Amino acid sequence: MQGNSRPIYNNRSFLKNTEFKNFYLGTSKLPNVSLAVGDQVEVPPECENRIDLFSYQQYGSSRLWWVIALANADIIKDPTWDFKSGMIVFVPRDANLTSSTGGI
């Protein structure tokens, strides 16, 4: 690396102008999801292994899948393979949910 700012690539590489980012995703800094208000919902067959589709059905946005995964962390370790048809999950109904997540 040249000065810890960029990796060294061949001059003919399409990656030659790629910047190097030295950061990590802080999972301990996740937004708080209110568990005070919500619904117990059964996962329908069409949403098996598709928490994103379930999120779309519940919130109108597939990008909020992580809210459901976070609220059900005790039963959903892997948001894809642990999300099974027939399981009962808690779906938070926080009125500030979309505004607190940046309007997603």
Image (cartoon, rainbow, N blue to C red):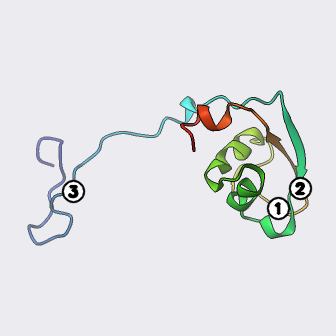
Residue 60: image x %, image y %? 70, 53
Residue 63: image x %, image y %? 61, 52
Residue 35: image x %, image y %? 80, 30
Q: CA distance from mark 3 to mark 1?
A: 40 Å
Q: Amino acid at mark 2?
A: Met
Residue of label 3: 18
Residue of label 1: 84
Q: Give the residue at x 90% y 44%.
A: 40
Could you tell whether 103 is left or right of 96 in the image? left
Q: Residues within 10 Å of mark 3 (few under 14, many from 20)?
A: few
Residue sticking out furthest to the left:
11
Q: Earlier in the sequence, mark 2 or mark 3?
A: 3
Which sits in the foreground, 40 or 70?
Answer: 40
53 relative to 38, above or below: below
64 relative to 56, above or below: above
Residue of label 2: 87
Q: CA distance from mark 1 to mark 2?
A: 6 Å
Residue 4: image x %, image y %? 18, 41
Q: CA distance from mark 2 to mark 3?
A: 44 Å
